[in-house]
């Protein structure tokens, strides 16, 4: 690959070829089945080849296409085993790597952003990237003062490419429906498109990462590398060694998975209270388990600014749900804007939809598992004719909170974490603890 493919015709052709290729493989599979291969073998072969092509194209395109792939990869824990198997390997690869930019392009960006004498800032610079993400890739280097640093370089043309990606991806809903039946692709793409502009602003990301680094400096549980330098398309931060969470998912012991999952939950819940921001891109590639037992956190391009912490109604409604008072829960959801006034919601359907988010807070200790999440997903799918999912509205202030919680549950189920999840909610989420001094939830 010579550069980030950003010409509209090229990118559209790559994406448009996906459903055509899928149809071709399906026809080929039918021929093999007629020729004697079993339906199961043919279906598995078609799924495998489809997955390989889908995620190869997403990885090559980077931009919005790869961002979507990363979002989908988080939810693979919800897939039935017979569907998840062929996709899991390609999904995991997407979280950690992508085809790198050529060295000449990397040097061109550095010269444009840091000046022709950019090498003077570094004692050494590794031309081979150590990681690649949706809109940029990371190189290891040594800063002029001797510190090891990570240099994140934004792909040239990434911003222009993103808009075209989302337009094209919106037309591929049926294809991605094979990955996650029932997924609201339109809503997912809309939310990602709105937030991607913030991730293109490396100065904004640097501001957020520095705030997290200051708050968690010398923290017993977490480490955030501080910012060394930044401008529009280059971000230099302290280097951090560690084991990627994706490797803990695939190879970790039960003890390691439990520890990683607990710290993961604690970080997501404590950050709004401590920093006034929520890390809003919680896929496993952004987390490392460090040799000292801490959880290292990377990539602060997507954050939800919550200066007052979590909305208090969020904790209150979770507590009331656990108490079984669905009438008050529904009234509170209307008050917060989740249920529009002109819709009547089936309480049982709503309870089933909310259960995966709330059930782990109802017991002292909870074990997350793929099987549990698959059962929850199946329950929601069975209830879809009631239209409860389509009837619910997501207020703008909750968009990123919902994204983080849904993705976070997926990661915890991939880890198979057993954790005292409830303790973290009690400590960090306002309104969850039953405080007699609390004002009643406004309902009307």
Image (cartoon, grey):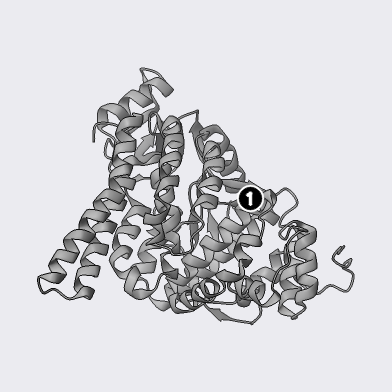
Residue in front for this viewpoint, 175 or 89:
175
Residue in front for this viewpoint, 237 or 308:
308
Is residue 430 something that shows in the picture? no
Q: Residues within 10 Å of mark 1 (few under 14, many from 20)?
A: some
The relative height of residue 339 versus residue 78 in the rendered view (above or below) is above
Q: Of all residues shown, which one is farthest toward the top?
A: 116
The image quarter containing residue 7 is: top left
**How many numbered dots are placed on residues in this image?**
1
Q: Percent x, y for residue 33?
A: 16, 70
Q: Of all residues shown, which one is farthest toward the front?
A: 34
Judging from the image, what secondary structure is the residue with disc 1 in? helix
Instruction: Please state, as top left, top right, bottom left or bottom right, where the C terminus lies in the image.
Output: bottom right
The relative height of residue 196 versus residue 27 in the rendered view (above or below) is above
Name the residue rendered at 64%, 74% in the picture: 349
Give the residue pinned by disc 1: 215
Residue in front for this viewpoint, 354 or 300:
354
Q: Percent x, y for residue 240?
A: 42, 50
Q: Could you tell whether 241 is left or right of 318 in the image?
A: left
The image quarter containing residue 71 is: bottom left
Name the residue rendered at 29%, 48% in the picture: 18
Q: Percent x, y for residue 328?
A: 80, 72
The relative height of residue 165 versus residue 224 in the rendered view (above or below) is above
Name the residue rendered at 62%, 56% in the picture: 401
Q: Of all residues shown, which one is farthest toward the left?
A: 35
Is residue 288 something that shows in the picture? yes
Residue in front for this viewpoint, 149 or 112:
112
The relative height of residue 117 versus residue 244 in the rendered view (above or below) is above
Q: Percent x, y for residue 333?
A: 75, 63
Instruction: Please state, as top left, top right, bottom left or bottom right, where the N terminus lies in the image.
Output: top left
């Amino acid at each position: 690959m010579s550069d980030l493919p950003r010409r509209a015709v090229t990118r559209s052709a790559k994406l448009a070829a996906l459903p055509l290729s899928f149809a071709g493989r399906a026809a080929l599979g039918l021929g093999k089945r007629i020729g004697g291969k079993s339906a199961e073998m043919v279906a598995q072969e078609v799924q495998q080849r489809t997955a390989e092509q889908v995620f190869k194209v997403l990885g090559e395109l980077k931009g919005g296409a790869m961002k979507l792939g990363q979002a989908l990869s988080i939810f693979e824990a919800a897939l039935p085993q017979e569907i998840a198997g062929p996709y899991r390997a390609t999904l995991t690869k997407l979280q950690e790597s992508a085809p790198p930019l050529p060295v000449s392009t990397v040097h061109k960006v550095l010269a444009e952003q840091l000046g022709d004498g950019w090498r003077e800032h570094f004692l050494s610079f590794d031309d081979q990237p150590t990681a690649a993400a949706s809109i940029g890739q990371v190189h290891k280097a040594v800063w002029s003062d001797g510190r090891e640093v990570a240099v994140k370089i934004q792909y040239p043309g990434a911003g222009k490419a993103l808009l075209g990606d989302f337009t094209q991806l919106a037309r591929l809903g049926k294809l991605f429906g094979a990955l996650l039946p029932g997924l609201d692709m339109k809503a997912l793409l809309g939310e990602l498109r709105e937030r991607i502009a913030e991730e293109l602003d490396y100065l904004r990301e640097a501001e957020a990462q520095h705030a997290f680094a200051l708050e968690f400096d010398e923290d017993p549980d977490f480490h955030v590398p501080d910012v060394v330098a930044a401008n529009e398309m280059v971000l230099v931060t302290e280097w951090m060694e560690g084991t990627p969470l994706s490797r803990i998912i695939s190879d970790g012991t039960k003890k390691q998975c439990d520890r990683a999952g607990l710290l993961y939950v604690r970080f997501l819940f404590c950050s709004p209270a401590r920093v006034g921001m929520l890390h809003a891109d919680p896929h496993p590639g952004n987390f490392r388990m460090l040799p000292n037992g801490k959880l290292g956190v990377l990539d602060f391009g997507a954050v939800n600014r919550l200066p007052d912490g979590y909305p208090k109604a969020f904790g209150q409604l979770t507590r009331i749900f656990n108490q079984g008072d669905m009438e008050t829960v529904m009234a509170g959801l209307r008050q917060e804007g989740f249920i529009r006034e002109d819709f009547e919601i089936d309480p049982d359907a709503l309870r089933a939809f909310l259960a995966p988010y709330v059930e782990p807070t109802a017991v002292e200790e909870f074990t997350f598992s793929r099987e549990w999440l698959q059962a929850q997903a199946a329950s929601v799918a069975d209830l879809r004719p009631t239209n409860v999912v389509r009837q619910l509205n997501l207020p703008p202030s909750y968009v990123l909170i919902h994204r983080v919680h849904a993705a976070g549950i997926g990661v915890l189920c991939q880890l198979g974490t057993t954790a005292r999840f409830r303790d973290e909610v009690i400590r960090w989420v306002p309104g969850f603890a039953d405080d007699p001094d609390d004002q009643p939830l406004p309902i009307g």
